[in-house]
Amino acid sequence: MHAFAEGGYAGTTTDQIAIHAGVSQPYVVRRFGSKQALFLAAYDRSVDELIGTFGRVHAAGGGREEMGHAYAELVGNREILLVMLHGFAAGADPQVGPRVRERFLEVVRMLSETVSHDPAEIRDFLANGMLINTMMALKIPEHLGEDPLYRSLAECTFGDKLAILTPEDPDAESVTDTDDQVSS
């Protein structure tokens, strides 16, 4: 997960994966068969975590807003987030793309069953999630002091979860709730 989160599918070698895992490169190939199979396993793990998180929220009676808050907490784990983003980026690859699209459709189906049957609401939920992904990939919560627009967009997007994402930020305590926060 860590190697693919840092380098993506195309930019990660089986040697780098072996180094991160503390094993030999031949062991990685023997265990998974190919870099592609290993990437898809990492991608599946990330999507499984996302679906599991949403499923737990739904089972506990939570809806769209609660799922949005849970998602904001989930993407605090940059490896999950970045592996998913790298999966989307590799979506045109003829070997990786079909699985990425299949898993994306699985997420959309789950949202249709748990959040709304309205395609526009699902689109909005996913669009807000992609904004969260983009901001996390760019490390915006770590750079709030660079521009007031970063802080205002982050506060609007993450709400009270911003404090979780920026524990070293002395201003994170001042975040207030708004209706637009993390309602992905």
Image: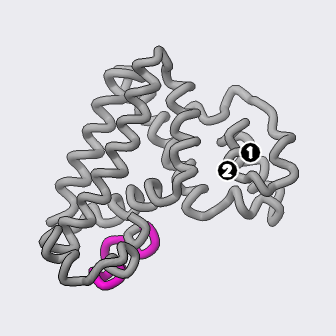
**Crowdedness of circle 1 by 10 Å Cα count: few (<14), some, many (20+)?**
some
Give whichever of 21, 145 is nearer the camera: 21
Which image quadrant for residue 119? top left
Q: Is 96 located above or below residue 156 in the figure?
A: below
Residue 184 can be seen, yes or no: no
Question: At 50% across and 43% down in the image, what residue appears?
Answer: 129
Is residue 130 found inside the magenta-colored segment of the image? no
- Find disc 2 in the rendering and name its residue: 165
Q: Which residues are magenta?
A: 5-16
The verdict on residue 12 being magenta is: yes
Residue at 46%, 55% (x, y): give it: 81
Q: Nearer the viewer, residue 3 or 113?
A: 3
- The answer to whether residue 104 is visible is yes
Residue 33 in the figure: left or right of residue 19: left
Q: Position of residue 142 (x, y in %)?
A: 71, 61
Q: Which residue is mark 1?
A: 163
Of 115 and 12, the residue lying toward us: 12
**Which residue corresponds to the image point at 42% horizontal and 31% vertical from the top-left?**
54
In the image, is 31 to the left or to the right of 62?
left
Tell me which amino acid carries mark 1.
Ala
Q: CA distance from mark 1 to mark 2?
A: 5 Å
Answer yes or no: do the residues labelled 1 and 2 have beta carbons within 8 Å?
A: yes
Question: Helix, strand, or loop for circle 1?
Answer: helix
Q: Position of residue 35 (x, y in %)?
A: 22, 73
**Residue 182, x across and y down, in percent:** 61, 35
The numbered mark at residue 65 is none
The answer to which quarter of the image holds residue 183 is top right
Q: Relative to 44, is 22 on the left or the right?
A: right
